[in-house]
Image (tube, helix red, strand yellow):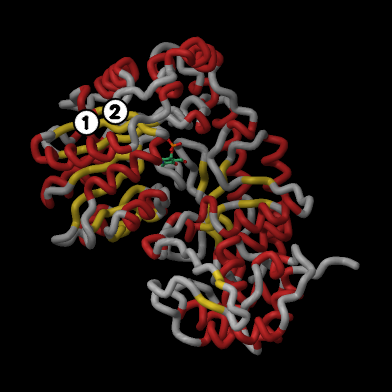
């Protein structure tokens, strides 16, 4: 006999527990968990299967096991147990000190371990619920085209041979921990790189390598942010910044980047958002998800705001070697010798080695006013002992000499040609417009929400996934306030991109939400 699906089991368990969709939403809220009405209705209608934590939540509310709810086991929890669980679910939660419960039969049930509520407002859709649904579909045998993550390796971009060779040569010398900030040779190469970018006042002591820029974003926000502090972050953003400020107890306050002005930050909006709690401005340049490269004038405007309001500047410049069409990149730290600046970069994208996990941050400018912050950074850096040493060992090789990435970003190069193609193809779709990206490998198109009747961009992403097996990231995943954008990663080869753009055009020719 065929196994029941999640949808069937969910309906059965709800019926047996006498719970309606609204009850699930309410009980989840009482338990401090977020469960949207539309989410539940999608589960009930069988459109979506929840990710693991939501599955556990639903199972807990319904008094069944997650395995049963998923359809993995045949044994039906008896109705009595389900009914008991309902009564319990409807009642207020036991205090966390009451660790064990005894059932009527005298056996002890284990207390529930929930994720920390520090994570309640943390969003990371780049690997979020729509991605979970894609994974579920893949398990069922579907082939999904992933245009959702900036990971070059699966699309045939290879690490430069010299980098791989040098890591191999040095591997046996990389068995121990390094200095917590990183190997001397790596930091020296980063320092020289910072000098070439005119970043002033850099001391070897204040260069830190990390397991990717990601680790250092988290580390630096934890070092800086007190509960209630505000950090200005672009919208759209690379969502890790918002997540890390939130996790550190702060508030991410978003300033708007203006699509009408080639996605440059709106300086008036930025300044209007400064309050007495604001500590820092984050600048992502070149930008993910828009592909924008900011002009020197715009950067000077940001520095002026930081100077006037005594703010630190955090500059995420991981795409600074992936700029097309002859645009020049200016490191914002080079314009702010008098201000405390932290500049982030790494090799994930420029050397197509996301998996090696190597990034760095450079503290520059006014070191004196960030002495205590540096103390905090050192504490946290020491606590994680050091970053991946084999990856550090190739920083010098990677930053010096011939830069193979340049082959990709000039006319005829893969990234350049794919960018041009995707830009043209998207703008040819009725109801879609996109600003041409100048850097990186992302484009952030706008949808005519009236034409497509779109009110929920997560629903749009799911519909596209189900209908065309294309996975993109919705604009909301980048802390963009309207449901009218999405991000495409244009790394796949041209023939794959062509097919996917045709599918996208076909989708939008019929789509109404
Ligand atoms: C703007 C930005 N910053 C940081 C990162 C993380 O990079 P890493 O691989 O060095 O952790 C990414 C990755 O996509 C990014 O787009």
Mark 1 or mark 2: which is in front?
2
Q: Residue at x 75, y 66 (%)?
A: 71
Could you tell me which quadrant the N terminus lies in? Answer: bottom right
* Residue neighbourhood size for the residue with mark 1, other residues' Cα within 10 Å, grouped as few (<14), some (14–19), many (≥20): some
Q: Secondary structure at mark 1?
A: helix
Q: Is residue 232 left or right of residue 214?
A: left
Q: Is residue 346 visible?
A: no
Q: Which residue is mark 1?
A: 334
Return the residue nearer the eye: 391 or 320. Answer: 391
Please state the total of marks drawn on the protein image: 2
Return the residue nearer the eye: 346 or 288. Answer: 346
Q: Where residue 66 sits: x, y (%)?
A: 65, 67
Q: Secondary structure at mark 2?
A: loop
Is 484 drawn above or below residue 177 in the view shown?
A: below
Q: CA distance from mark 1 to mark 2?
A: 22 Å
Q: Residue at x 63, y 51 (%)?
A: 471
Is 371 drawn above or below residue 187 in the view shown?
A: below
Report the disc number at residue 158: none
Give yes or no for contact between labels 1 and 2 (Cβ–Cβ under 8 Å).
no
Q: Where residue 486 sits: x, y (%)?
A: 53, 55
Q: Earlier in the sequence, mark 1 or mark 2?
A: 2
Q: Is residue 92 visible?
A: yes
* Residue neighbourhood size for the residue with mark 2, other residues' Cα within 10 Å, grouped as few (<14), some (14–19), many (≥20): many
Q: Residue at x 34, y 19 (%)?
A: 186
Q: Which residue is mark 2?
A: 181
Q: Residue at x 56, y 71 (%)?
A: 109
Q: Residue furthest right?
A: 1
């Amino acid at each position: 006999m065929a196994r029941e699906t999640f949808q069937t089991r969910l309906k059965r368990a709800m019926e047996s527990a006498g719970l309606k969709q609204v009850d699930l939403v309410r009980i989840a809220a009482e338990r401090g968990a977020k469960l949207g009405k539309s989410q539940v209705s999608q589960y009930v209608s069988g459109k979506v299967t929840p990710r693991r934590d939501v599955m556990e939540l639903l199972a807990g509310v319904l008094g069944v096991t997650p395995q049963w709810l998923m359809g993995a086991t045949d044994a039906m929890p008896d109705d009595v147990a389900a009914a008991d669980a309902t009564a319990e679910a409807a009642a207020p939660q036991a205090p966390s000190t009451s660790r064990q419960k005894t059932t009527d039969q005298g056996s002890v049930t284990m207390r529930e371990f929930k994720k920390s509520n520090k994570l309640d407002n943390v969003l990371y859709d780049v690997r979020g619920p729509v991605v979970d649904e894609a994974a579920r579909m893949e398990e069922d045998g579907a082939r999904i085209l992933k245009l959702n993550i900036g990971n070059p390796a699966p699309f045939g971009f290879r690490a430069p041979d010299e980098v791989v060779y040098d890591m191999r040569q040095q591997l046996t010398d990389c068995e121990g921990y390094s200095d917590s900030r990183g190997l001397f040779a790596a930091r020296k190469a980063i320092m020289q790189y910072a000098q070439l970018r005119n970043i002033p006042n850099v001391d070897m002591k204040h260069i830190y390598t990390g397991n990717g820029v990601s680790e250092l974003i988290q580390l630096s926000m934890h070092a800086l942010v007190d509960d209630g502090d505000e950090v200005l972050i672009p919208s759209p953003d690379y969502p890790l910044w918002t997540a890390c400020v939130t996790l550190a107890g702060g508030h991410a306050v978003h300033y708007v980047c203006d699509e009408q002005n080639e996605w440059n930050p709106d300086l008036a909006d930025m300044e209007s958002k400064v309050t007495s709690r604001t500590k820092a401005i984050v600048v992502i340049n070149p930008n993910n998800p828009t592909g924008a490269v900011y002009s020197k004038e715009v950067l000077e405007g940001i520095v002026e705001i930081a100077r006037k309001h005594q703010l630190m500047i955090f500059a995420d410049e991981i795409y600074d070697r992936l700029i097309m069409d002859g645009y020049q990149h200016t490191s914002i730290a080079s314009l702010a010798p008098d201000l405390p600046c932290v500049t982030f970069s790494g090799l994930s994208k420029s050397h197509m080695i996301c998996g090696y996990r190597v990034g760095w941050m450079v503290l520059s400018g006014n070191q004196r006013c960030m002495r205590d912050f540096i103390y905090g950074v050192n504490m946290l850096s020491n606590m994680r002992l050091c970053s991946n040493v084999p990856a550090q060992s190739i920083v010098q090789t990677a930053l010096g000499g011939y830069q193979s990435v340049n082959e990709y970003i000039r006319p005829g190069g893969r990234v350049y040609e794919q960018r041009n193609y995707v830009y043209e193809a998207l703008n040819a779709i009725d109801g879609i417009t996109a600003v041409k990206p100048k850097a990186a490998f992302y484009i952030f198109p706008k949808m005519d929400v009236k034409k497509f009747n779109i009110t929920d961009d997560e629903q749009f992403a799911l519909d596209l996934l189900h209908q065309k097996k294309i996975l993109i990231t919705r604009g909301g995943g980048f802390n963009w306030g309207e449901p009218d954008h999405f991000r495409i990663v244009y790394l796949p080869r041209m023939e794959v991109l062509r097919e996917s753009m045709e599918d996208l055009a076909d989708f939008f020719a019929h789509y109404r939400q």
